[in-house]
Image (cartoon, grey):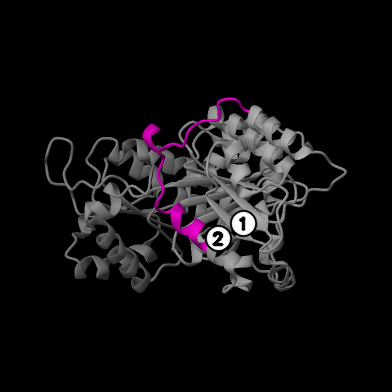
Amino acid sequence: MNAPWTMSQRTANGAPRDQFAAFLCDEDTLEALKPVANELNWPHEKIFKGGMRNAIQTLAVSASPQILLIDLSESEDPIQDINSLAEVCEPGTVVLTLGNINDVGFYRDLMTSGIHDYLLKPANSDALRQSLLSAQTTLHAPKSAVTEEIAVRHLVPVIGVRGGVGASMIATSLASVVANHHGLQTALLDLDIHFGTGALCFDLEPGRGLTDALENPNRIDSLFIERAMVKDNDKLSILSAEAPINAPMISDPNAYHQLQHEVRSGFECVIVDMPRHMAVQHPELLSEASVIYLITEMSLSGTRDTIRMLAMLKNAAPNANILVVANKVAASGDPEVSRKDYEASIERQLHAIIPLDTKAAITSAKMGRPFTESAKASKASMVIKELAKQISAISVVGEAEKQSSVKDKLAPFKALLNRKKS
């Protein structure tokens, strides 16, 4: 059962559907519902005795109403019974439930199953009225707001070509800006299981959610992900870990793909802080990326590894827009490799250069907040904010928009190396 069910006010044969029906287990609830039914001009004849079992039996042989209220208090397995109900209900039914179970996990399971509301018994007339009016609002909401809007979901891996180039700083900053300044529901997924700093950069405890997911991939679903994530605010959630370094992670290779898929299904934008060894070992994680930020440094080793990563990404993510970003570039002094030589070697232009700002980086670490929050006015923050602005605008690029591929992967690097030696 999906929430909300497809809206329809007629049965499959075109006949009008009843507005309302209720299946209740006790007299007290029935008496509380009657005055509300009177106010809404709903007939008492549509209020039946008996809970879920009676509802399933009745709806198996008759048309389901637009709004359905069911008492779960006599159900031995409410979630399984909800699934059985979905098999006999016609599309368009808004389902309300009530029962005796006072548990947050149970409530979330019901919501995930497509239930519109759950009331804890004893339910008075006011609570019933509010829930039924809410159901009416949902029922008559414009279709475009419920069924026709398709969210653009961005998967944005951030990969450092070498350790220490600042990929994690950029990933956390991008997530913060996309969520807080551009208003997208954003997830930060930190795949460095042992040394990740995704939660640390927000001064949060990562918990065991990520390691539990990878150790038990059969448990990965939307509800599990919701519980495993820690929230920085209503727009930004983080899934990170600090697994013991003496306990190597041995997990199903498909667990990472399943994890990323579930996270992506619940958010408009997923920023993935992806260690380069993960990109190499699990290239399938990059196949659906819309944008990949490849973070590098202006050095010989950075040049070599950028060339190698670009060659790998060409096959792993053929539809992604791959943007090379140089980080920690000093304002004064000559870099190990000039921009001109660097771009000639990788056969593409640098998308952006982020200046080195050691003082701002130290302040960010002390404050326990992303770089773009703790150093809002710095030039480095301005560049990162421009990168974040592009995420909501960039779609998968066509062949005509892609930059030229790297033909001879190591030849430009070798030529540059020879010039350096001479």
Marks 2 and 1 close (CB-CB < 8 Å) = yes
Q: Which of 358 and 122 is in front in this view?
A: 358
Q: Name the residue under label 2.
A: 384
Direction from residue 355 to residue 85 in the image, left or right: left
Query: What residue do we see at 21% from left, 58% from top?
Result: 140
Give the secondary structure at mark 1: helix
**Residue 311 position in % (x across, y down):** 59, 30
Quarter-wise, where is residue 56 in the image?
top left
Question: Crowdedness of circle 1 by 10 Å Cα count: few (<14), some, many (20+)?
Answer: many
Q: In this view, does 121 lie above or below 83?
A: below
**What amino acid is labelled 1 in the image?**
Ile
* Magenta span includes 401: yes
Say if the magenta span includes residue 130. Answer: no
Q: Quadrant of the N terminus?
A: top left
Q: In this view, does 53 lie above or below 400?
A: below
| Residue span colored magenta | 384-409
